[in-house]
């Protein structure tokens, strides 16, 4: 095993702590980390490309043979959670509609590519997870702007065409390029490249998170009770998505690996894409929650995976 692979493996279970560290760096050194903001779209393209390696168009077609887990993920990610976010946001902050928009922006975002890391770590169904991520990534340029227009169209003017274009550049094009490479070079070749680029993709994610949070510094300098409540609700939404995914999986009596995958995919959003879109198209109040949410997301997902691992260990010991 190479040194880079060892570093990548060491980083995987420690990602929640590393994310807190890079968030602190972004908040403490906003002028320095903020210089990376113009390059976030390019970094997101690279991360999406390398993380999508190993998936193929055949995998997307084959997943429709057993569509129930995927449909439940999409139901949670793109219908239940955005509606809950909009309802809670407008109820708690009736005079701050941009806060509700920030909630909806996060909850309507596609499933995070980082979910592959957690599903693999928890011995879930990696093939199903990759299919969900790729399928949702390809749909995101349509679903995210449409959800924002339906729920928040009266709050702020929306550049729907611009959001579709940016999401296509950050997600659809690199994911499609990765699947085309798999089609012509073969899955073993792409899987080998993906394995070797694991450290690279983790570092990109940390850099993007640190750069995006710099946009929240002006609001955090004026912290008050309202912002503390906003941060608390931002945290609560993360385990809520995981719990809904877990509850639906138990309701349909999925096997353990499918249950883990649906749970993680239901609660792990591509917040980097959400915060990038928020920074480019919306005021700072709407970008605040997407900027700080990665800290809560990775922490809650890691706890969920640890609970699954302990449950499996207890079952195996009986």
Image: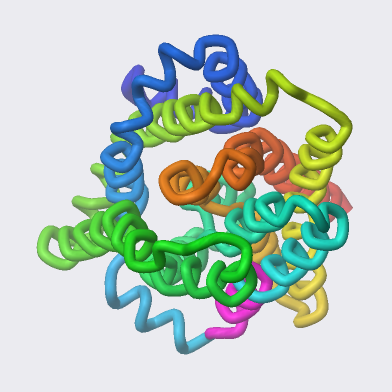
The overriding secondary structure of the stretch rendered in magenta is: helix
Q: In the displayed image of the protein, which residue is found farthest to the left?
A: 184
| As drawn, 287 above or below 64 | above
Q: Is residue 71 magenta?
A: yes
Q: Identify the colour scheme used.
A: rainbow
Q: Quadrant of the N terminus?
A: top left
From the top left corner, tell me how far across and down residue 221 is, in percent.
69, 19
Residue 195 location (% of width, % of height)? 33, 40
Of the pair 276 and 302, the residue shown nearer to us: 276
Residue 53 in the image: state x and y as whole percent.
29, 53
Asked if one can make out residue 316 in the rendered structure from this viewpoint, the answer is no
Snapshot quadrant of residue 259? bottom right
Q: Which residue: 64% across, 57% down?
A: 101
Q: Give left or right: position of 216 versus 91.
A: left
Residue 48 on image: x %, y %: 34, 49
Q: Nearer the viewer, residue 165 or 240?
A: 165
Classify residue 149 as left or right of residue 166: right
Q: How many marks?
A: 0
What residue do we see at 49% from left, 32% from top? Answer: 212
Q: Is residue 315 above or below residue 213?
A: below
- Which residue, as the protein is rendered here, is positioned at the far bottom? 65
Residue drawn at x 11%, y 64% is 184
Q: Is residue 294 visible?
A: yes
Please check the rendered image and state whether residue 210 is part of the magenta-colored stretch, yes or no: no
Instruction: Please state if 134 lies on the left or on the right of 9 as rendered.
Output: left
Q: Look at the picture and state if 42 lies above or below 211.
A: below
For the point 37% across and 36% down, which residue is it? 201
Q: In this rendering, is residue 296 above or below 77? A: above
Q: Quadrant of residue 104?
A: bottom right
Q: Which residues are magenta?
A: 67-77
């Amino acid at each position: 095993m190479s040194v880079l692979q060892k570093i990548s493996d060491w980083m995987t279970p420690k990602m929640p702590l590393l994310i807190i560290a890079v968030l602190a760096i972004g908040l403490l050194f906003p002028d320095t980390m903020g210089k990376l903001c113009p390059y976030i779209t390019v970094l997101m393209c690279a991360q999406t490309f390398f993380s999508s390696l190993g998936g193929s168009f055949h995998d997307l077609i084959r997943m429709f043979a057993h569509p129930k887990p995927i449909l439940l993920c999409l139901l949670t990610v793109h219908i239940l959670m955005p509606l809950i976010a909009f309802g809670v946001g407008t109820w708690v902050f009736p005079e701050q509609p941009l806060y509700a928009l920030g909630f909806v922006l996060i909850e309507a975002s596609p499933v995070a590519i980082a979910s592959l890391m957690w599903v693999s770590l928890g011995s879930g169904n990696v093939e199903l997870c990759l299919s969900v991520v790729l399928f949702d990534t390809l749909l995101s340029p349509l679903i995210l702007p449409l959800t924002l227009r339906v729920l928040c169209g009266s709050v702020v003017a929306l550049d729907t065409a611009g959001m579709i274009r940016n999401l296509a550049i950050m997600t659809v094009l690199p994911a499609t390029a990765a699947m085309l490479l798999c089609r012509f070079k073969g899955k073993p070749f792409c899987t080998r490249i993906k394995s070797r680029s694991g450290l690279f993709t983790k570092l990109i994610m940390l850099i993007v998170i640190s750069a995006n949070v710099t946009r929240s510094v002006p609001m955090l300098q004026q912290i008050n009770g309202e912002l503390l409540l906003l941060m608390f609700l931002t945290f609560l939404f993360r385990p809520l998505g995981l719990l809904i995914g877990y509850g639906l999986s138990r309701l349909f009596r999925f096997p353990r690996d499918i249950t883990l995958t649906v749970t993680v995919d239901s609660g792990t959003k591509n917040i980097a894409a959400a915060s990038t879109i928020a920074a480019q198209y919306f005021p700072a109040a709407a970008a605040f929650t997407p900027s700080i949410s990665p800290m809560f997301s990775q922490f809650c997902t890691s706890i969920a995976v640890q609970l699954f691992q302990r449950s499996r260990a207890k079952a195996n010991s009986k």
